[in-house]
Image (spheres, helix red, strand yellow):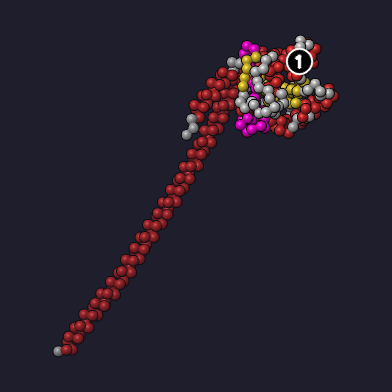
Amino acid sequence: MKDYVKEFQKKIAAIDKDSQGIRIINAGVMNHGKSSLFNSLLDKDVFAEQDIRTTMTAAEALWEKDVYLVDTPGLNAEQSDDAEAYAAYRRANMIVFCHTAKVGELRAAELNAINGMKKLFDSDEFFWQHFCLVITFLDSDSVESIEVIKNKSLSDIKNTCGGQDFPVFLISNTRYRKGRDENKEKLVQLSGVSELRNYLSSQFTRFRSENTALRFKRINREKEDLLELLRKERDKVERTMQRKEASMRNRQEALCARVEYVVSEAKSDKEVLAGKRSVLSSLKADLARLRTKHDNERY
């Protein structure tokens, strides 16, 4: 039987570790600029940036003091990637959802993913207070088209996911890096990265104050999950016992029926044998009389 208690203890240890730091976790479909964004915030290339599936496990990097940026696998690439990503979302103080403007508005899969993330938090209200949308764009994208995509995305999130009044950032990682590398402050400002960095930094005090309460909530959630697993295991054992008892009763009933049949057959055979013995005795008696009669008539 699986050692659920041991696994629960491991999860509690992980929760205790998480409560000692702040985790900003990115989310979104593969190749939507998640890793590039976090590298921009870090001002160094820590996370792999390629047009192929490279991030398959959640990886974290220290941003400052007790604050970590966590890069997750892209959604809808592989089932295992989604599982890894959702495991990371459960640990989030803030989810930064990235969407690239080059594909237009948010896709249905992205909206479904946001709805899935909500379920990992204690309430919808709490989730939206710890969620922000980042729309990454290329310098070739027009301001008008980006605004259209932003407004449509906000409308879809409101109508499909029930979320509104969360912060939205328009980010150009290429513009930021060009400005940083060429010491062009205007490009850095226009990239939107500084705006996002300042917003996240302003939330650190709130996140730290929430961590103790979050620790207890996450532990309680793990307790509930453990109890549910144990209930399912108990039900499974009970169903197995019921099947075995039913099978045993069926075998017992079949055996009893067989014994009754054999006893009945034996009783029937005994009665037939008794009848045949009676006939035989009668025949023997008749034979004896006939012999006696025959002997008397001879003399």
Q: Secondary structure at mark 1?
A: helix
> Can residue 232 be seen in this snapshot?
yes
Give neighbour class at mark 1: few <14, some 14-19, many 20+ (Cα, 10 Å).
some
Based on the displayed image, in which of its 4 quarters is residue 93 positioned? top right
Q: Please tell me which residue lies in front, 184 or 118.
A: 184
Residue that protrudes farthest toward the left in the picture: 299
Q: Residue at x 65, y 18 (%)?
A: 46
Magenta residue check for 146: no
Q: How many marks?
A: 1
Q: What span is colored magenta in the figure?
A: 64-83
* Residue placed under numbered mark 1 in the picture: 178
Viewer-side residue, 157 vs 266: 157
**As displayed, is residue 74 above or below residue 212?**
below
In percent of the image, x 62 and y 19: which residue is there?
60
In which quadrant of the rendered view does residue 78 lie?
top right
User: Mark 1: which amino acid?
Assistant: Lys
The residue sitting at the right extreme is: 144
- Near-viewer residue (102 or 202): 102
